[in-house]
Amino acid sequence: MTRSSPCASCKLLRRRCADDCIFAPYFPSDDPHKFAILHKVFGASNVSKLLQELPVAQRADAVSSLVYEANARVRDPVYGCVGAISSFQNQVSQLQMQLAVAQAQILCIKMQQTH
Amino acid sequence: MTRSSPCASCKLLRRRCADDCIFAPYFPSDDPHKFAILHKVFGASNVSKLLQELPVAQRADAVSSLVYEANARVRDPVYGCVGAISSFQNQVSQLQMQLAVAQAQILCIKMQQTH
C-alpha cells in the first residue's frame, strides 16, 4: 500500500512511499529541504541504516541531530559543527579563567578584611 | 599510473589508487579505520564531493573535522557531536552564572568598604 502523498524523502528519491517508510514520520512532504540537506551530507541509505539500528523512540532525536550537523556542514564545509565545538571550548576556558580571577579577588578582599 | 601501495580508501573501495587520488594524502594505507568510519557515516562519494569543492589547503582540516564527527556519531548514534555541543552550552550557561554571582559579590564587598 502507498500513501496518498509520498514523504519528502521518497519524493526526492522518486520511489514509492510505503506505509512503513522509515523516513515518513520525520520528513513530511511540505518540508523538502530538511531531507535534501541530510541526503546531500550523509546520503539517504546511511541515514536509513542509522535509523533502523535505533529504537523508534530515539529516531526523532537522531533526525534532529543529523539535520543540525548537516546544516552546519553546508554552512561551513571545512569545519561543520566541529567549528562550534572548538569555539565553545575556547569560551569555556575563558570563562573558567575569569571565574578563577574573580574568586581569587574575593578571597583577597576577605583576607584583607580579617586582618 | 597506480601507486605501489593503494591508500586506505582505495583499498576499502577495492579500486585502483591513481596518482591524483583525492583521498590518498589524508588516508594512508596503515590507518584503515580512519577512512572506514568516514565511509560508514558519510559515504565515500559524499566525502569525495565535499573535498573536491574545497581548495587543497583546506582539505586536511575538513578531513579532521569529518573524522571527529563520524567518530562521535559512531560513539553516540542518537546525538553524535551535537551531544557535545549541548553539554558545552550548558557548561557555558553555568559558568556565566557563577561568574555573574562572583562579580556581584565583589561589587557588594567594595560598596561595603566605601561606606
Image (cartoon, coloured by chain):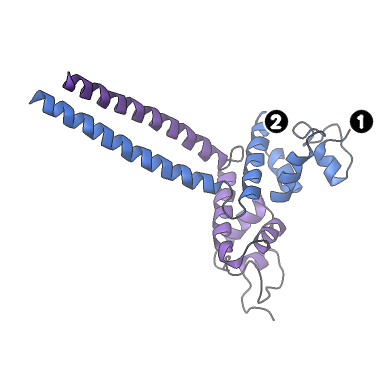
Chain colours: A purple, B blue
Q: Residue B55: tell me if it is visible.
A: no
Residue A81, quarter of the rendered image: top right
Q: Dot 2 lies on which element?
A: helix
The disc placed on residue B4 is: 1
**Residue A69 image position (x, y, % from top left):** 57, 49
Image position of B54 (left or right of B105): right
Check disc 1: other Cα within 10 Å, few if <14, some if 14-19, many if 20+.
few
Q: Which of A61 and A32 is in front in this view?
A: A61
Q: In which quarter of the image is the C terminus of chain A?
A: top left
Q: Quadrant of the N terminus of chain A?
A: bottom right
Q: Dot 1 lies on which element?
A: loop
Residue at 74 percent of width and 47 percent of height = B39
Q: Mark 1: which amino acid?
A: Ser
Q: Which of B81 and B4 is in front in this view?
A: B81
**Residue A106 image position (x, y, % from top left):** 25, 26
CA gap, disc 2 and disc 1: 23 Å
Residue at 76 percent of width and 44 percent of height = B36
Residue A34, quarter of the rendered image: bottom right
Residue at 69 percent of width and 50 percent of height = B41
The disc placed on residue B56 is: 2
Vertical position of residue B60 compared to residue B35: above or below: above
Mark before the other along the chain sequence, 2 or 1: 1
**Residue A98 image position (x, y, % from top left):** 35, 28
Residue at 50 percent of width and 44 percent of height = B85
